[in-house]
Image (tube, grey):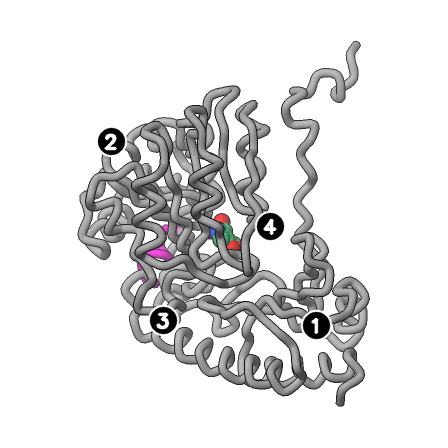
Amino acid sequence: MKSPAELARDCIKSIRPYSPGRTAPIKLASNENPLGPSPKALAAMEQAIRETRLYPDLPSTELTHAIARHHDVAPECVVVGAGSDEVIYMLGMAYVNPGEEVVISSPPFATYCLIAPVMEAKLVMVPAKDYRHDLEAMAEACTDKTKLVFISNPYNPTATIVRKAEVDRFLSAVPEQTIVVLDEAYFEYVDDPEYPDGLDYVRQGLNVLSMRTFSKIHALAGLRIGYGVAPAELAKWLLLVREPFNVSSIAQAAALASLEDREQIAQAVALNAEGKAYLCGEFDALGLTYAPSQANFIFVDIGMDSVQAFDALRQRGFAVRTGDIFGMPTHIRVTIGTAEQNGRFVAALGEVLNRP
Ligand SMILES: Cc1ncc(COP(=O)(O)O)c(C=O)c1O
């Protein structure tokens, strides 16, 4: 009998296991929304729990139509997934042939790194510049084999954005067989007027997929639900490879209730803006530099080894993301929390940096 290691596909053997990071009582490590879900979503979940003996609505019809109405696109353009992570997988399965290329920025968002090896494709990483995607270099990195390019906008881990004029230029420079994914997981937090709405490109009929999630502003990360919007002709192939019952009925119900809860979203945006202003002010006072954030997290250079800082912060009850995993060992990525969490975090960081 051969060992499973001999039987496993060679192409996946280079994959590094995803590290979720260690947690702590105050978790500022995964860019979650500290406010929690909308009361409407909670009520919808309670209702949906009673119906779990039934399979979920296939294929998320009611939610798909609601998302389509919300964005004023045809329902055929919408692909609902178990988190946007699953939409990334569907893109790989539907579009990436062995030997083709997937272009991403370095440091990367972890899920983008998975589909290239799984599909026996080549992952091409283009270093970010000044904490931002280097779209010119990414366009240059595209070849006649490039099938997918992922641009997280805002960019995880730095929270910076690329602006409309740059994205316009990039889209006109990519080869004809390249699909561009604009991952807009943090879309709602952005306040820069030059931020491009990925859906505009979808409406123009370009080979663009705009990806959104219920994990961040909607605070439904634990349910695993997100979606992509693309021209119907592009979305059609994702729908073909999607697992039939990929999204649970509870997740669909919560997302449906949360989608139009503008009050909840406005509250989360306001809390985040206040928290961001406060943290940036405190970082300035500590003399720390950080990337300009357009999301619910900040990438800050603390000027010391981030793994050591992580341990010291953890002893004080906080979990953040260390920069070593992003190749920037003196940086940490911290999620913006509630006012109280932010205040306590600043006090703890001051102690760790020896600057009370
Ligand atoms: C850039 C980016 N895209 C996608 C996701 C994942 O979203 P989901 O929870 O919908 O899979 C995250 C989560 O951290 C993210 O930062």
Nearer the observer, 127 or 354: 127
Type of the residue with mark 3: Asp
Q: How far apart in space, not on screen, are marks 1 and 3 (Cα)?
A: 26 Å
Q: Which residues are magenta?
A: 252-258
Q: Which residue does the numbered mark 4 point to in the structure image?
A: 107
Q: Who comes first in sequence, dot 2 or dot 4?
A: 4
Q: Is residue 102 left or right of residue 41?
A: right
Residue 288, label in figure: none
**In the structure shown, which secondary structural element does the residue marked by tag 4 occupy?**
loop
Q: Which residue does the numbered mark 3 point to in the structure image?
A: 191
In what quadrant of the picture does the C terminus appear? Answer: bottom right
Q: Who comes first in sequence, dot 1 or dot 3?
A: 3
Q: Which residue does the numbered mark 1 point to in the structure image?
A: 302
Camera-side mark, 1 or 2: 1
Q: How far apart in space, not on screen, are marks 2 and 4 (Cα)?
A: 31 Å
Q: Which residue does the numbered mark 2 point to in the structure image?
A: 233
